[in-house]
Amino acid sequence: MGGSEEVTQGSDGARVAVVVVGAPVDDDSAAPPPAAAAAPAVTPGEEAAKRESLAAAATGLQAMAVTVARDVEAGGLDASTSGAADEKPSWFTPKRLLVMFCLINMLNYVDRGAIASNGVNGSRQSCTGGTCTSGSGIQGDFNLNNFEDGVLSSAFMVGLLIASPIFASLAKIHNPFRLIGVGLLVWTIATAGCGCSFDFWSITICRMLVGVGEASFISLAAPFIDDNAPAAQKTAWLAMFYMCIPTGIAVGYVYGGLVGNSLHWRAAFWGESILMLPFVILGFVIKPLELKGFNHSVKTKKYDEMLNPELQDETKQGASTGVDGLAETLPHKFSISSFGKKVLTEIRYFMKDMKELLQEKVYVINVLGYISYNFVIGAYSYWGPKAGQDIYNMASADIMFGGITIVCGIFGTLSGGFILDKIDSTISNAFKLLSGATFLGAIFCFGAFCFKSLYGFIPFFSVGELLVFATQAPVNYVCLHCVKPSLRPLSMAMSTVAIHIFGDVPSSPLVGLLQDKIHNWRSTALTLTSILFIAAIFWFIGIFVRSVDRFNEQSEHDVPAVERSNLRPLLDENEEARAS
């Protein structure tokens, strides 16, 4: 079979190699008959018709036998679905992806702030001196005591912790972008359900489902941002994403207060559901994006062979591994269903990935520091206003602590990302920034609680929080880059699970228990703040642990060469973004 190769320059600056495969040499149409050379000249009309027919035939052949190979910047190859160039989402650029994910992240935390606001959470009915005041909000309508109200505020954590590793594992066999769409759909239905709830248990179940919906986004959004951010601004983009956490909570306080007081607390949840709906539709309508390190056409075939013994016999001629090997050792009377085998396969792969993740020393040290850090920050957010009111007799402790946290959270998170990019985004530099910022932040926060005057406390605590929040982007950068690309969703999921289970979830009751023992908020606050030094020590150790940035590892080793030649950048502007 004859053919020719032609190299052209694409509109996006990439070289495109077009291989046109010709017809078989023994085909009569492959060459004109000898008599054709002596044929008389044709008329202009006939010549134009011939030219058009030849062009149409050439176009058909090229459409059937084209292999696209793009020269992507070394180390920047993204696993994306293959296909014709006109199938790419022309409007969906890396910057738009970042904006979309930031808005979704902010909506997640607007919900956190809204349910804690006075306009939505409300208060119970109270009676003093024979005069009773009616309750308001969720607590008043459902007559919740403080314990039930506390359970309600943290119920989403149950769904988040359970679903995060599940979504991370499903990303291996299902498109991660579609999984985010599924999660956001669950979130939208759950928030609408909160507005329709009729008692404590109904709204608690809905809050758990809100956590399930959020789990897909928390596990998968950061890897997408890391894939598409410019090489020199990866940490800055992560900082912009995580900056939405304090901003969203602050907006949620205001939103919940305004909507809850002017309309009804149920309307606040319905409004959140409506605001998220466009992103749900977008997640299902636009062409699904792929994560670096994943090739679902290959993965799906691999799983199909593993779950289908007949197909495996055809491809491997009787060779069996994994779950099929287990199935063949069982008596024939015990048949394992396809679903059961798939569950076993998922468990096996999950345990294998978890083992690999826990063997990564850099990841373990990073998460240990993150747990210690989150232990302090979680208790600060819950007990800070009460401690400040008791120690310094603050008239408006909620506003004071809330304002400091919001301002320092925004500027600290952004500065941490930009600083790491300026000093070169490496894992070693990230640990240097993490340990240094946390150590200095701990000194300022510890010193703040030593002041007897409020005027000394505010500036020292503000500087301390600014330094402490600078860790948000670098710590997540390490989680993403110390593991191979296919483990990044699980890395983010297990990091989230660990910092909540061992960090902010137990810290609030433990600090309360300590205060009940010593009855001194200043000593309690100083004891809590000292744990930041432990976080700084863990991250300081990370500087001396041998680390390798594994961002490009799997794209070279786990994706076959033939598949790599057919992969194209994830988004249209990806090449330009990486070069900038």
Image (cartoon, grey):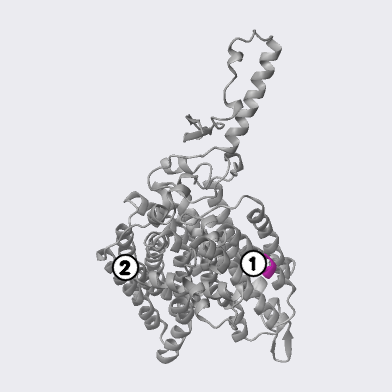
Hey, what amino acid is under mark 1? Trp
Using the image, tell me which numbered label, if any, was put on residue 247. none
Stretch in magenta = 187-191
Which residue is denoted by mark 2 in the rendering? 539
Report if residue 389 lies within the magenta region.
Answer: no
Q: In the rendered view, tell whether residue 201 sits above or below residue 238.
A: below
Q: Residues within 10 Å of mark 2 (few under 14, many from 20)?
A: many
Q: In the rendered view, tell whether residue 65 sits above or below residue 112.
A: above
Percent of width and height locating residue 462: 41, 64
Q: Is residue 291 visible?
A: yes
Q: Residues within 10 Å of mark 1 (few under 14, many from 20)?
A: many
Main secondary structure found in the magenta portion: helix
Q: Nearer the viewer, residue 559 or 148?
A: 559
Q: In the rendered view, tell whether residue 450 sits above or below residue 519.
A: above
Percent of width and height locating residue 310: 57, 66
Check disc 2 and report its element: helix, strand or loop: helix
Percent of width and height locating residue 385: 49, 75
Hey, what amino acid is under mark 2? Trp
Q: Earlier in the sequence, mark 2 or mark 1?
A: 1
Q: Residue 276 occupies which quadrant of the picture?
A: bottom right
Check disc 1 and report its element: helix, strand or loop: helix
Q: Is residue 453 visible?
A: no
| Quarter that holds the C terminus | top left
Using the image, tell me which numbered label, if any, was put on residue 187. 1
Q: Nearer the viewer, residue 238 or 141?
A: 238
Mark in the foreground, 2 or 1: 1
Q: Nearer the viewer, residue 471 or 218?
A: 218
